[in-house]
Amino acid sequence: MAVSFPKCPSSSLPPLQTRNRAWSSPLSAPHQVGDSSKWALLEATKRCHLSVSSATNGGSAVAPVEPSKKVQDSGTKTTPTDHSTKVENGIRPTVFSSNEFQDLKTGPDNSGRESTVSITVVGASGDLAKKKIFPALFALYYEGFLPKHFTIFGYARSKMTDAELREMVSRTLNCRIDQRENCDAKMEEFLKRCFYHSGQYDSEAHFVELDKKLKQHEGSRISNRLYYLSIPPNIFLDVVKCTSLAASSENGWTRVIVEKPFGRDAESSAALTRGLKQYLHEDQIFRIDHYLGKELVENLSVLRFSNLVFEPLWSRQYIRNVQIIFSEDFGTEGRGGYFDSYGIIRDIMQNHLLQIVALFAMETPTSLEAEDIRNEKVKVLRSMKTLEIDDVVIGQYKSHTRGGVVYPGYTDDKTVPNDSLTPTFAAAALFINNARWDGVPFLMKAGKALHTKRAEIRVQFRHVPGNLYKKCFGTDLDRATNELVIRVQPDEAIYLKINNKIPGLGMRLDRSNLNLHYAARYSKEIPCAYERLLLDAIEGERRLFIRSDELDAAWALFTPLLKELEEKHIAPELYPYGSRGPVGAHYLAAKYNVRWGDLGAEH
């Protein structure tokens, strides 16, 4: 019989699948799976009330489907092969691909062998690996989200033993605040799964040695391999070539997570994509932007598409402007050498903030499938007007003394050239040329060494036509404007500013907040973005990763601006360390009759 699965509540799934997943559609013809899969089918049927339709041949084997070897990447439409599936109550049930069906199982696979996941962190001795990746993997293990069989390998040029890697990793691990009673035991179990291999990034022979070690731990199981490239972009291709030729899985999947930056402009990004695709298919490449894994960013579509009160207002008719604000209260702190070759526009705006804009402004996708969501994001990016120099302000922080403490300027960093024109601050006005958003300014602002640390989305609504209470607000109508604020970090929250009567006999109005404060509402600690994205990569969920045509569309917006800034040697406006940024940013907002929302009394 052929099996098809309608979606079921995520809470009824086994631990690996407790999060709400949008599983992929079938991409190729079904194949038969032996009777050893029946146990998993029976268990899944009990848990999720899964429907089983009989095949015409009356056979007893389940029939999941293999994912295609390569995913269409046009950005306009991804058309998988259509397999007839029984439609009940007007809803087409989801059909698991073989990899997803394998994830669901806790018993043997069709060949009687269990599967294992080998996670190799390339660049294991670097800061990102130590501070983010290994702690995120431990958190997944601690919460029970990693598969039963898994192995973690660190790979880098540094000479290190397994014991030394474990000692290094152990210093950055911590347990969830609500489950500390077995923390030490869990740490010890996790560290026993961690190993190290030293080698050059461009040495195929060293990756052959890594492959041998991986096989020793994988044994006779089906081997699935995930490589996380926590390395500089100039050696991406060397590592991808070596892993593809010498250390890919022979009987399971192989996936590669690539960290930003994805090039410096449209040309270098396209060259990197071509290089990656010489050795990998698009569906093996997971371009990570950790901001997409943040709780409040992932909640954007839930907030909009599952609440009737918001979706009708999500257009130019009711929204006056949208602001995406990112600020850090510290400078480059010794990493100025890296930062100076990219700058704030490439480091923050072209990826993190633009991805938020695309998620915020996209049309309703046809489903929660990864390709449907990414298709809509690409449409938004392709509808955006190319950035012009007149709609951009750049700045660079300078030394400032406050409270007797001297804060160094950007060029005071010994790793930064004294005559550097690299911006540490940028503000830009973007416009989306479609029916929903025509004329609405999307204002971005990102900077280092500012007065506060925050990332937030601010949606300022239009003034109430013929407002009966406008006299109560005087001439400043902005005080009477409703504003939706989504605070991504820190201290996550969503609040809506409304006008309200102050209790008493007179008619005095006040602005109040309808506030969802995550720390007060939810007792569970919010996971790190890397936890969510690593789990997605293991499960093959691509919704929060960037597709190549999406990347091309993003670079097409910023490349002309970046070239003009560099060719004309445009000097950034200086601003004091710890200030609110360059004055020019306020003039840019005023140009479109906007006031930055983070400058109000609440800040």
Image (cartoon, rainbow, N blue to C red):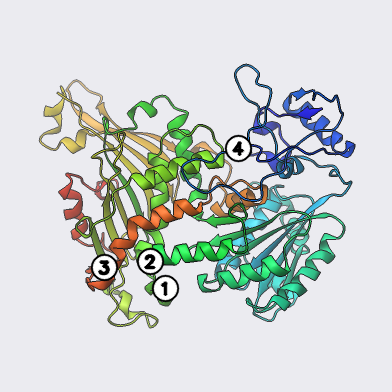
Q: CA distance from mark 1 to mark 2?
A: 7 Å
Mark 3 vs mark 1: which is more N-terminal?
1
User: How far across and down, in percent of the image, does residue 558 sit?
Assistant: 33, 59
Instruction: Identify the residue position indicated by label 1 in the image.
Output: 333
User: How far across and down, in percent of the image, does residue 403 sit?
Assistant: 28, 70
Residue found 24% across the figure and 27% down from its top: 502
Label 3: which secondary element: helix
The type of residue carrying mark 2 is Phe
4 w.r.t. 264: above or below: above
Residue 344 showing in the rendered view: yes
The type of residue carrying mark 3 is Leu
Marks 4 & 3, CB-CB < 8 Å contact: no
Instruction: Identify the residue position indicated by label 4 in the image.
Output: 22
Give the quarter of the figure containing the N terminus.
top right
Q: CA distance from mark 3 to mark 2?
A: 24 Å
Left or right of 33 in this view: 414: left
Instruction: Identify the residue position indicated by label 2 in the image.
Output: 330
Q: Quadrant of residue 468?
A: top left
Marks 1 & 2, CB-CB < 8 Å contact: yes
